[in-house]
Amino acid sequence: MSNIHNFGAGPAKLPSEVFDELEEELVNFNGTGISLMETSHRSATYIKLNAEIQDVVRRLLNVPQNYKILFLQGGGQGQFAGVPLNLMSRTGTADYVITGVEYDFIPNTNGVPLVADMCSNIMSKKFDITKFGAVYGCAQKNIGTAGVTMVIVREDLLNQAMPACPSVFDWTLTAKNNSILNTPPMQAIEVMGRVLKWIERNGKLEKMEELAVKKSSMIYDYIDQSNGFYYAPVEKRFRSKMNIPFRVGPPKGDVDLENQFIEDAEKQGLIQLRGHSLVGGIRVSVYNSVTVEDVEVLLRFMKEFFKQHAK
């Protein structure tokens, strides 16, 4: 709906073009006469789709052939467990860095395999995949809808899963079976593929990054000019270009005022702005599918709210 502006952190907004394609294909996928949801995951139809989507990922991220592209279930939480289950059998140890903010560089680990949770920013910019042993991202943010998680892993890191690793999280088994170890979430994978092709048609990752910088800068710039009425708690250098958290009122926020902000925003079609349950406040997610026009509408509302409530 044109009067709804969805800033959800996940499941997030999808491109309108993808909805149009899905509507056309929902009950008759690729001329088969049935929905993909009714199609065998062992069929030539699905195997072809699976390969096509992997090819798009390789093109967008320039993924070398010595990396496997896997489609798994379980979301980010599944891979929180999947990473150690697949990689820690030799050493039994791993170092974790939990920042809450986005690095603007790729750390040099001096040969230790580097693994990154890219759930929020994968496919929003180009990066050198060869500097990583593995990366993963759940689809319901930048690249589709809930149900599928993409893992990109270097081949030499396979065949190391712990004996306790469940088969559905085992990267080696998944790779050997081309992500068809069991029935995959085919509809979610189709949506992911359509979003990836939408990215490819619309300027690829270079354009996604350009727009990410523009959209996030529009919001951060206004926050920084609001004389403290809006307050972004993250150091400027490490501010995410995908998720913009801020408080309303004092630096730690005025909960009543923030609730009023959310209520008034929803009346104007600006939805899913409530901050993470652990930190509160406001969170604006500007993933690839969020348009500059969406952000402009939000900024008009923020300016009006400032006029009404700033002291």
Image (spheres, helix red, strand yellow):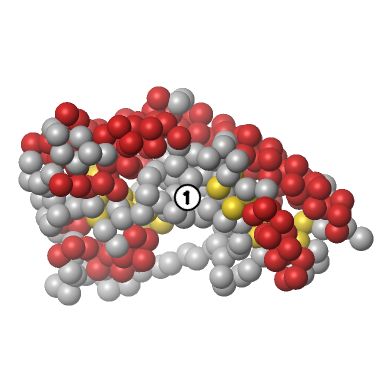
Residue 134 shows in the view: no
Where residue 132 appears, x then y in whole percent? 36, 49
Q: Which residue is mark 1?
A: 12
Quick one: 298 or 87, which is closer to the camera? 298
Relative to 68, does residue 251 appear above or below in the rendering? below
Residue name at image x 63 percent, y 34 percent: 293
Where residue 52 appears, x then y in whole percent? 22, 33
Relative to 74, does residue 120 appear above or below in the rendering? above
- Say what secondary structure mark 1 lies in: loop
Where residue 305 appears, x then y in whole percent? 80, 53
**What crowding class fits label 1: few (fewer than 14 Cα within 10 Å), some (14-19), or many (20 or more)?**
many
Q: Quadrant of the C terminus?
A: bottom right
Relative to 46, does residue 267 appear above or below in the rendering? below
Where residue 143 appears, x then y in whole percent? 39, 43
Residue name at image x 17 percent, y 50 percent: 179
Residue name at image x 40 percent, y 51 percent: 140
